[in-house]
Image (spheres, rainbow, N blue to C red):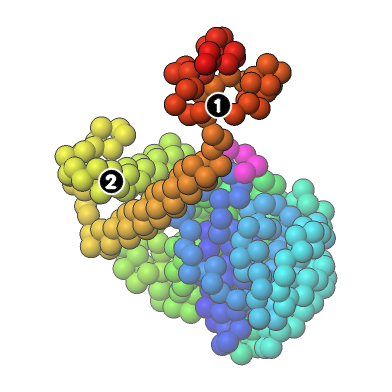
Amino acid sequence: MKSIWLGQGGLLIISGKLKIMIDPYLSNGMHDFDRTMRRRLKIDKRFLKIKPDLLILTNSHADHADMKTVKKLLYKTRQKTVVLASGRAYDRVYSERIPGRYTNIMFEEGDEWTVGHILVTGIKCRTDDKTAFGLLIEDSMSNKKIYYVGNTLYNKAVIETVPKGLDVAYIPITGRYSTMNITDAQRFVSEIDAKVVVPIHYGMFDNVDPRKFECKNKMIAKPYVVIPIDAETAETKKLSGPERLKLGLDEKPSPFPKTLKQAIKAEKAENKAYSMRKQLVDALEKMVEYDDPTLTDQSGIAVADIYAELGSTPQTEEVVEEKIDKKAMKKKEKKKANKSINEELTLNEAVSEPPVLDGPVLDDPAVEEFAAEEIPPEEVAPDASQEDSQTPPEQ
């Protein structure tokens, strides 16, 4: 059995061919609800391509029942995924009407679900979502017991429901969103029987340091990396800190920026790179259009300067040239179409143009009477528009 921490409360468990995903948060959906909730851990898109056999949503919080992630995992899936969701999370999944071959099931404390050689049981928890639950996952193939605490506060009634002989327990330590803080989490794990304790639910939106979580059988996980649970033995527990780091038993929380300010700075750097690539494309398009290699973009930045800062690659140049070729072709086709339209309009105007009358208006009765008489061409007055042209010339 393998476990991978997906950041925040997310977890992926793999046993044989079975894949179980718990509370995945692989989007920036929380930022839509609260602009201060900007994720600090980059999204590993590899995990969005996984089609789990079991998708579990333990509560309805947006960082646990993230509909953006759920849609990507379930949309038009051919995998017969079973979704076990708390009452409120079940309603959210149902309301999305996501097309796919999955089954949405309302799950709660005390319920059990078997998939292959794995038994999943709902465990009591205490949070602001009254339909939320924790998890006990028992694997008969590897004889492992995993306890996923879920969002919960320190509560004696919750501790009494926790079974004995756990191989690993995943416990939240953030102290926000109705979860335990570090002090209460330490009290909680001291009263349960778990060989290994892995702190989770921190670092995504806060500055919580897991190294302050004091526990004799603690293991700090690294996001998107397999947690080496099986490697933990009585001998490895006696090793010093540097030796444990070398073996990969403990990991520093380096993937997380230390502050929200650093996270915003990193996002600005990414936006700047995107903006400069767009400027590069615009500048090169102008060079093609006006055949002038000295032109700059709208911001006055020279093409050479943009290449120097971005560090151009053949791939970048190919993408840029492809965009320029497409745009130049569209402009050429548009220009040709406009030319043919203008020629057609000019031809129509030439055919339908009414004759120009240099003489008087035909609506005048005197002109009509005069026009009825036959006049030799050589004796016609030089200017038919004058008033004296209305009387016949003297013989």
Q: Which mark is residue 289?
A: 2
Magenta span of residues? 32-37
Q: Quadrant of residue 268?
A: top left
Give x and y (percent) for residue 391: 59, 13
Front residue of this view, candidates 346 and 20: 346
What residue type is disc 2 on? Glu
What residue type is disc 1 on? Ile
Which residue sits furthest top? Answer: 387
Apparent side of residue 177 relative to residue 307 in the rendered image (left or right) = right
**Where 123 sits versus 312, above or below?**
below
Magenta stretch: dominant secondary structure: loop
Q: CA distance from mark 1 to mark 2?
A: 63 Å
Image quadrant for the N terminus?
Answer: bottom right
Q: Which mark is residue 112?
A: none
Q: List the residue tagged with mark 1.
A: 375
Can the viewer see residue 285?
A: yes
Q: SS class of the residue under badge 1?
A: loop
Apparent side of residue 38 relative to residue 69 in the rendered image (left or right) = left
Give x and y (percent) for residue 69: 61, 61
Which of disc 2 and disc 1 is earlier in sequence? 2
Q: Quadrant of residue 263?
A: top left
Task: Give the residue displayed 73% in from the left and 58% down from the top.
Answer: 59
